[in-house]
Amino acid sequence: MERIDPRARSDAYGNRINRSHSTFLATVVPWGSILLASILPLFPIASALPLLPPLGFLMLLGWRLVRPGLLPVWAGIPLGLFDDLFSGQPFGFAILTWSLALIGIEILEGRLPWRAFWQDWFTAGIVVSVYLIVGWLLSGATPNIHSLIALVPQLVLSILLFPILSRIVARLDRFRLHRWRTI
Amino acid sequence: MAPTGQRRSGYSRRAQYNLFTGYIVAGIGALIGAVLLVLSFFQPQLFGGLRGAAADGVSPATETSATVRTGSKSIWDSISGYYRAGSKNAELKREMEIARIRLAEAQAVEQENLRLKALLGLREEDIEPVAVTRLVGSTASSTRRFAYVGAGSDQGVEVGMPIRSPRGVVGRVLETGSDSARILLLTDTESVLPVRRASDEVVAFAEGRGDGLLRIRLINLGINPLEKGDLFVTSGAGGYYRPGAAVAILVEKTDDGGLARMVSDPAATDFVSIDPIFEPEAALAVETPTETELSD
């Protein structure tokens, strides 16, 4: 069989004989990657402007849009709680907005069940724009026009980053479902 | 990608209930988030302990990355220095820059001394910093400008203490964890700092604009005496900051003051010292929220 088709006994996730998925990885990878992405903006110092995209939120959108049905609707509560600890926004901001975003996407998906990547990107772009502008309004500081202008580079970066992040999510999903050797 | 069939529960009661509960929980979660958000608007310090613990938790990682960042930056500095005119060039330039700031600060101190001598024998001793540490991270994706330093209440850091780099003022401590502290950078829109021009007695407030610049608002309105390139130093009013530390350089003149760039850009800062509060009694006396204290 192997001589005719070398990939006969395997699929995208590896060889099928004597191997199986790891339950641990399958559950932990999506949640873990979002938590990690929430912490990441702490590391590089770029303090004059808010420049880094909200990576945690983008990762959440990535998992939600690239792999629908994987994250439950209520995932915004625990993940947002964690993001609130590090994001610098007032506490509760991410819990509220992440939950609303997930509910909103759920409603949207009911109306547009079949989508191409372009539509996903469009959705993510709109959701991220709204998220950043609401974040500017509800940051606890007095919103002024200058900080709104300072938001533009971050917004553009966030929208441009989404395709890359969704590729990363797809890679992580392959890793999540990789077959490991079992005896 | 096409959605899975999970949304359609079919005739299974269990699946229907699961789906329904998911929506209910998500809705309740959004409500809880809204309540927490409102709470933290009125009591910003309420969740400080939680945030402090979280920052402590990641501080080993952030400190390592700060070390690596500083290291790689200095390597890059010497490479670029060699590329131009030998690795010393970069170092000399940095020294020169600091020397220029120091000179302006010295002028400010001279001015200050003249004034103080007019008063009684007021004397200031050198201040011993509470801690010298690294700027380990910042909230780079939020509109608010916060940063984290690698020293906390275990090292004696308290809320309100000013943070200085070798170049000038960076900000002040907002919340303390046991091993890390959250600081409010000068560029945050909630930060207001009383300053004066280094060369004379023109006093003003330096307010953050949220886009990396500071807005200098003169206290005495009238003819705007400021000029591009003026250096502003702390005036010591309010009691938090020691007078005479470099804050910002004017880059643009406006009607009621000007726009200034921070002397000590946090992005170029590695080590900072946390000083004790300059006049704790004075700071306590004016302990009203900054917004109400300084609004006109």
Image (cartoon, coloured by chain):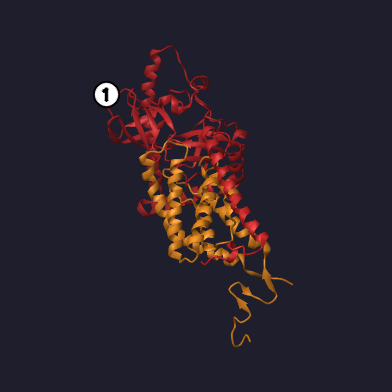
Chain colours: A orange, B red
Numbered disc 1: secondary structure: loop
Estimate the x, y position of residue B261 in percent, counting from the top left: 36, 38
Chain of the residue displaying label 1 = B
Estimate the x, y position of residue B27 in percent, counting from the top left: 57, 48
Quarter placement of the C terminus of chain B = top left
Dividing the picture into quarters, in which one does residue B227 lie?
top left
Q: Compared with residue B66, is residue A63 higher up or lower down, i.e. above or below?
A: below
Q: Nearer the viewer, residue B248 or A25?
A: A25
Among all residues in the image, which is located at the extreme top?
B120
Q: Compared with residue A149, is residue B274 higher up or lower down, i.e. above or below?
A: above
Estimate the x, y position of residue B251 in percent, counting from the top left: 31, 37
B266 sits to left or right of A174: left
Dividing the picture into quarters, in which one does residue B32 lie?
top right
Name which residue lies at 30% across and 29% down: B256
Q: Nearer the viewer, residue B205 or A160?
A: A160
Name which residue lies at 53% across and 59% down: A64
B173 sits to left or right of A145: right
- Report which residue position mark 1 lands on: B222
Estimate the x, y position of residue A157 in percent, counting from the top left: 42, 54
The amino acid beneath tag 1 is Gly
A159 sits to left or right of B152: left
Q: Nearer the viewer, residue B169 or A28?
A: A28
